[in-house]
Image (cartoon, grey):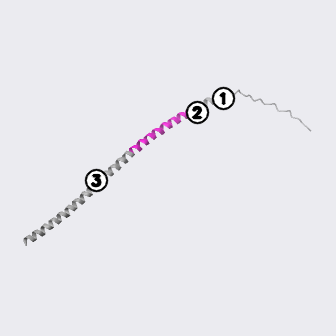
Amino acid sequence: MEASALQMEHECAVKLNQEKDFEIAELKREREQMAADHRDTNEMLSTSVAGQKQLTKLLRDKDLFVETLKAKATEAQRELDQKEAQQQAREKDSYPLIMTYSLPSPPATSWQ
């Protein structure tokens, strides 16, 4: 009977060993999937960070461009105002003074 008990114990140990091997294989698959997911997540995050950096640079460049454009617009407006003032001064100087004369009132006539 001892041989039968040993045989049963051996069978139980083999079955338990198979179950543990199955668990180990399943855990290895899960680990590999998690590692792949981790790589994908890292890649997505790296791409996202790179995109954010590009957007940040683009926004800084845009802000610089807007400031430069404002400064140029202000300078252009100042130059335009100066030219208009000079043109008005030239026009004022080029027109002769027109003197107005008043005509005497006609004599009052009485038509009675």
Residue linked to disc 1: 91
Residue linked to disc 2: 81
The single residue placed furthest to the left in the displayed view is 2
Q: Is residue 26 magenta?
A: no
Identified by mark 1, the residue type is Glu
Q: Earlier in the sequence, mark 1 or mark 2?
A: 2
Secondary structure type for disc 3: helix
Q: Please, what is the dominant secondary structure of the magenta stretch?
A: helix
Identified by mark 3, the residue type is Ala
Q: Earlier in the sequence, mark 3 or mark 2?
A: 3
Secondary structure type for disc 2: helix
Residue 46's x, y, as percent? 34, 47
> Around disc 3, counting alpha carbons within 10 Å, would you say few (fewer than 14), some (14 to 19), or many (20 or more)?
few
Q: CA distance from mark 1 to mark 3?
A: 82 Å
Quarter that holds the C terminus = top right
Figure quadrant of residue 76: top right
Residue shown at 31%/51% (left/top)? 39
**Which numbered tag is attached to residue 61?**
none
Q: CA distance from mark 1 to mark 2?
A: 15 Å
Quarter that holds the N terminus = bottom left
The residue closer to the viewer here, 80 or 107, is 80
Residue 100's x, y, as percent? 75, 29
Q: Which residues are magenta?
A: 52-78
Residue linked to disc 3: 35
The residue closer to the viewer here, 108 or 3, is 3
